């Protein structure tokens, strides 16, 4: 009995771990950028670390069983890597400099809604506003839009849990400051653009994976290609050798963490959760990262939290849950329809058998 309870709790513990890892990504990335690290150089090192970590596992586990990679499929993976990883992460890095770790965690909550909206535009999803689930989706989209606007334009009262002190003050030159209005709005716009590219990546990669189903090799190849792409962009933007130099400091920790823990380990944890539960269960845990980041950024980075950030985050979470509830309801209706069809089919077969026996 105790073993059964323990196994049933594992998915809940794992999703808490996953969202804690993502919160750590927001915090460490922001800390590295505040410490003066070039965002484009950081993204390159992050992707290179992820590639070096994944290559041995991909070659050992899937190389022999992988299907042949056609030139057309390779081109699609190259474009996926460029838009979904390279542009998304590079824009995200610049946006994080302009805003805060809390905002990054908050806007990530609208990723499922952005993904749904993109799928709707590409006719991969259907919206029926006259149904309960369709209305819930529409309300969810409106909530997320309102949340994004609130984050961008409304500040309100500010809260600083530790005054102007923080636990990482030695690497931070600008902690405790409130960005100007124009800078904050620009950062919000870039953060939404980054999440839009990420959502487009989620929508389009499903079709590519049908022609190349080796998931680990698929991920590794994308990391490798994005390493090349981010290097080209970084070397074009930053040619000062000093900016590329790494030492045994927080910058190296942030690179290793984002490349190995976030890209490598979290990928497998998410796959395990979806196998044990479902994607909706995983997506429902997304707001945990916002809560963890909200308090940790104030304590570790000395970030000033505004009322607008809290209200905007709540609206984004509300929109997320509306869309996820609608998707869950639609799936349950589909499952019920399939079950009824199976029952009708079995009843018809039973009746045919009875008729055959009676005639005989």
Image (tube, helix red, strand yellow):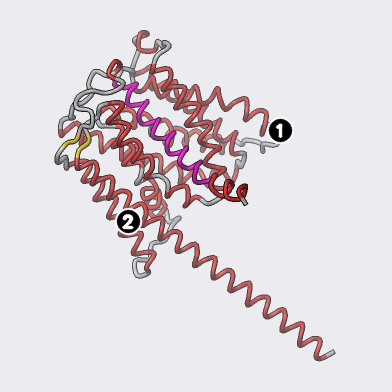
The answer to whether residue 240 is left or right of residue 16 is left
Q: Residue at image x 43%, y 22%?
A: 255
Image quarter of the C terminus? bottom right
Residue 25: in magenta span: yes
Q: In this figure, which residue is indicated by the disc labeled 2?
A: 140
Image coordinates of residue 184 in percent, x first then y, are 20, 34
Looking at the image, do the residues carrying marks 2 and 1 touch, with CB atoms under 8 Å apart?
Answer: no
Front-most of residues 300 and 2:
2
Write down the region rendered in magenta: 11-34
The answer to whether residue 1 is left or right of residue 33 is right
Image coordinates of residue 33 in percent, x first then y, are 32, 22
Give the prevailing secondary structure in the magenta stretch: helix
Q: Residue at image x 41%, y 43%?
A: 200
Q: Residue at image x 57%, y 35%?
A: 218
User: Which residue is farthest top?
Assistant: 242
Q: Which mark is residue 7?
A: none
Which is closer to the viewer, label 2 or label 1? 2
Front-most of residues 205 and 356:
356
Image coordinates of residue 261 in percent, x first then y, are 49, 29
User: Which residue is farthest right?
Assistant: 360
**Vertical comparison of 313 with 52: above or below:** below
Front-most of residues 31 and 138:
31
Element at label 1: loop
**Label 1: how many residues lie within 10 Å, few (<14), some (14-19) or many (20+)?**
few
Residue 246: in magenta span: no
Q: In this figure, which residue is indicated by the disc labeled 1?
A: 64
Q: Residue at image x 24%, y 43%?
A: 310
Image coordinates of residue 241 in percent, x first then y, are 37, 8
Element at label 2: helix
């Amino acid at each position: 009995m105790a073993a059964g309870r323990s196994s049933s709790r594992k998915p809940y513990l794992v999703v808490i771990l996953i969202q804690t890892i993502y919160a750590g990504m927001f915090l460490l990335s922001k800390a590295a950028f505040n410490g003066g690290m070039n965002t484009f150089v950081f993204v390159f090192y992050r992707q290179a670390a992820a590639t070096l970590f994944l290559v041995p596992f991909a070659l050992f586990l899937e190389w022999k069983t992988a299907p042949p990679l056609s030139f057309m499929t390779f081109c699609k993976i190259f474009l996926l890597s460029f838009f979904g990883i390279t542009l998304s992460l590079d824009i995200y890095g610049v946006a994080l400099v302009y805003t805060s770790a809390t905002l990054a965690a908050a806007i990530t909550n609208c990723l499922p809604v952005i993904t749904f909206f993109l799928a709707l535009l590409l006719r991969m999803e259907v919206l029926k506003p006259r149904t309960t689930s369709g209305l819930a989706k529409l309300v969810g989209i409106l909530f997320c839009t309102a949340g994004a606007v609130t984050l961008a334009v409304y500040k309100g009262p500010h809260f600083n849990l530790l005054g102007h002190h923080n636990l990482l003050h030695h690497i931070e030159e600008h902690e405790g400051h409130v960005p100007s209005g124009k800078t904050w709005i620009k950062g919000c716009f870039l953060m939404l653009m980054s999440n839009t590219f990420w959502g487009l990546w989620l929508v389009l990669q499903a079709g590519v994976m049908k022609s190349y189903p080796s998931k680990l090799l698929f991920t590794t190849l994308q990391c490798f290609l994005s390493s090349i792409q981010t290097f080209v962009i970084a070397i074009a933007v930053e040619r000062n050798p000093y900016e590329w130099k790494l030492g045994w400091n927080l910058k190296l920790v942030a690179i290793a963490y984002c490349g190995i823990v976030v890209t490598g380990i979290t990928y497998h944890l998410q796959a395990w959760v979806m196998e044990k539960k479902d994607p909706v269960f995983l997506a429902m845990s997304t707001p945990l990262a916002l809560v963890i980041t909200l308090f940790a950024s104030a304590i570790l980075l000395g970030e000033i939290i505004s009322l607008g950030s809290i209200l905007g985050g709540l609206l984004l979470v509300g929109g997320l849950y509306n869309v996820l509830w609608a998707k869950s309801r639609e799936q349950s209706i589909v499952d019920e329809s399939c079950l009824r069809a199976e029952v009708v089919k079995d009843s018809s077969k039973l009746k045919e058998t009875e008729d055959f026996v009676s005639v005989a």
